[in-house]
Image (spheres, coloured by chain):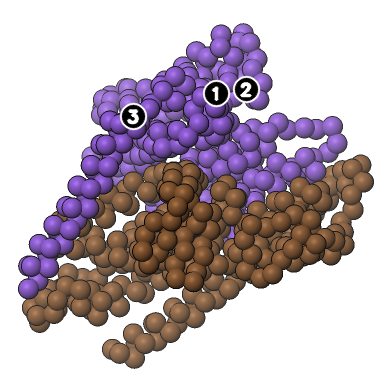
Amino acid sequence: MPQMFRQGRFWVQLCVVVALIAFAGLLINNITVNLIRTGLGLDFGWLWRPAGFALAETALPYAPTDSYAWALTVGWLNSLKVILMGLLLATTLGVAAGAARSSRNRLLRSLSGGYVALIRQVPLLLQLLFWYFVAFLGLPDTPVGGLIHFSNQGIRLLGLNLSVEFCSVLTGLVVFTGASIAEIVRGGINAVSRGQWEAFRSLGLSEGLGLRRIVLPQALPAILPALTSQYLNLAKNSTLAIAVGYADLYAVSDTTITQTGRAIEGFLLLLLSFLLLNLILSGGMALMNRVVLGRLQRSR
Amino acid sequence: MNRWLDRWLTLLLLALIGWAGWSCLHWLWRGADWTVVMTNLPLYAVGSYPEAERWRPLLCIAAVVVLIAITLFGPRQGGWRRAIPLLWSGMAPLGLWLLAGGLGLAPVGTQSWGGFSLTLLLTAGSGMLALPLGVLLALGRRSDLPVLRGSSTAYIELMRAVPLIAVLFFGQLLIPLFLPPGVELNRVLRAVLAFALFAAAYIAEDVRGGLQAIPPTQREAAMVLGLSPRQTLQLVVLPQAFRVALPSLTNQAVGLLQNTSLMAILGLVELLGISRSLLANPAFIGRYLEVYIWLAAVYWLACTAMALLARHLEIQLDPVRSAR
């Protein structure tokens, strides 16, 4: 019987392989036929040709005479900028809002609950459009504010100039991801037993200190893994920047593909960049996870 | 000391809320002009669907709303209760027939589908395609066969690494390239297909989580009772796994509904797309806030209804309750 079972498994496996190969073959056949029909081959030579389009916002010097490859790199850096700042601010907002859910102040608690309930049920794209067209483009033409200058041309903070597009994408991502992080933090805090709260309160520690020193460190092992997937979501969601005209990696890829007609190559490059980004993010989070857990173990 | 801090915090928050509320009221009385919403309600509902046939998508939306109401607030016991799953499964073909026409109704091309009815169709269509595909992928990822496991894992991980907008964009662009010459899919179908391929990877992970939560003893017990591997899966493992995975599947469904808004970037006139074209109309120039608040309310209601339905289903499937 086991022999027969094994043989059966072998045949199933063979069938799967044959079916997969046949399916892939069909797709590849179709795509070659179509590529020949449209006169396009697989080719990356266009990467070194001048891009010819301007980018509104660049972290490194860029001119339209530079190559497509450089334009894509600059777009990648723009993505990275908004993602990294977004991670930092969304975490801050999320932890604050999540901790506020277990505050003793009822008003603060319900405010935070309302924020999460509202933001999570409205599409991110709609929120981004709101921040861009209503909030930031609705600012006055002439700068207002003292230390920070607000206007519909951008925000100037000391020597730092932030464009309206960047600010809208950043705000949208932070507010949206912050709500999800708040839910995770709340779940993590709830998982810490009530006895811990009662213990630090009876020791005379203040709410804030107890939260930071007693409760949050114990909630971290439950929070960190879920946080990683939120960070990856934020990175992926940053591609919606195209809707408000921020020149991120996806927007630049989009323009590049429209100009060159190289959809497959463009898609492959985008896929690679995102795989790289995901690897960096999840690698960083895995490292943090280890460090945090290690420190927790040592302190016990 | 602590109490004082608390009081100051309350005062500060009250001041903030008061200020925000006052600005809102001021805007509502002085600045808000809802004609952009009021005069275009049919457009938001059905898009540029031919005037004479508008009753069809409207009927479709009404049927869904009534069905939700019956499910949530209808009778808790009796024959009605048993008819509800049947009604829901009949809704999809009925809706498709009403929108597309044929069989006695005048056919209407997908290019004139739009508004909330298109949003509903995109959500339901891609969800129904993605669910079986996701279950297959989840089973594939847990299979003992290395080839099947490897290819499922690769598909899931690759799909989950890419942003949705890229999948949708390249779905529009690349799906025609992968099809044999002469075969064509229209924009809406390509969107549904790309959506489903994307969502299936996420659903697969949720279902896999559910499968992992089922102790191996369940499978062993079923085998001992003489159930075939397929029966074991169908009657014992999958039903339990679904119950475990339901909350996360709900989140996916709500996400799916929200993400249909991305099709606006690619030029489909679903709820957000129709609003973008309305805002480009010189008669409604600058009425962003009214339109966005209106859209947010519609999406919020739709998502909340979906979450409530799922919560309802969770209670229905609860073994402790249904044993009674």
Would you name the residue on which mark 3 appears? B71
**Quarter of the N terminus of chain B within the rendering:** bottom left
Counting residues from the start of the chain, the first of labels 3 and 1 encountered is: 1
Residue that label 2 marks = B112
The crowd level at tag 1 (other Cα within 10 Å; few <14, some 14-19, many 20+) is many
Quarter-of-image position of residue A97: bottom left
Q: Front-most of A113 and A15?
A: A113
Chain letter for the part of the structure drawn in purple:
B
Tell whether B93 sits left or right of A88. Answer: right
* In this view, the mark in front (3 or 1): 1
Mark 3 is on which residue type? Answer: Thr
Q: Which chain is brown?
A: A
Image x and y of residue A186, in percent: 29, 62
Dots 2, 1 in contact, CB < 8 A: yes
Residue toward you, A128 or B245:
A128
Check disc 1 and report the residue beneath it: B47
* Pointer 2 local density, CA inside 10 Å: few below 14, some 14–19, many at least 20: some
Report the Cα–Cα distance between label 2 and label 1.
7 Å
Under circle 1, the secondary element is loop
- Give the letter of the chain under mark 3: B
Q: Earlier in the sequence, mark 2 or mark 1?
A: 1
C-alpha span from label 2 to label 3: 31 Å
Q: Secondary structure at mark 3?
A: helix
Both marks 2 and 3 on one chain: yes
Question: Depth check: A14 or A276 in front?
Answer: A276
The answer to whether B43 is drawn above or below residue B185 in the figure is above
Q: Amino acid at mark 1?
A: Gly
| Residue positioned 14% across, 58% down in the render | B10
Q: Position of residue A95 (x, y in %)?
A: 33, 66
Q: Are marks 2 and 1 on the same chain?
A: yes
Q: Is residue A252 toward the left or the right of residue B78 in the image?
A: right
Residue A176 position (above or below residue B116) = below
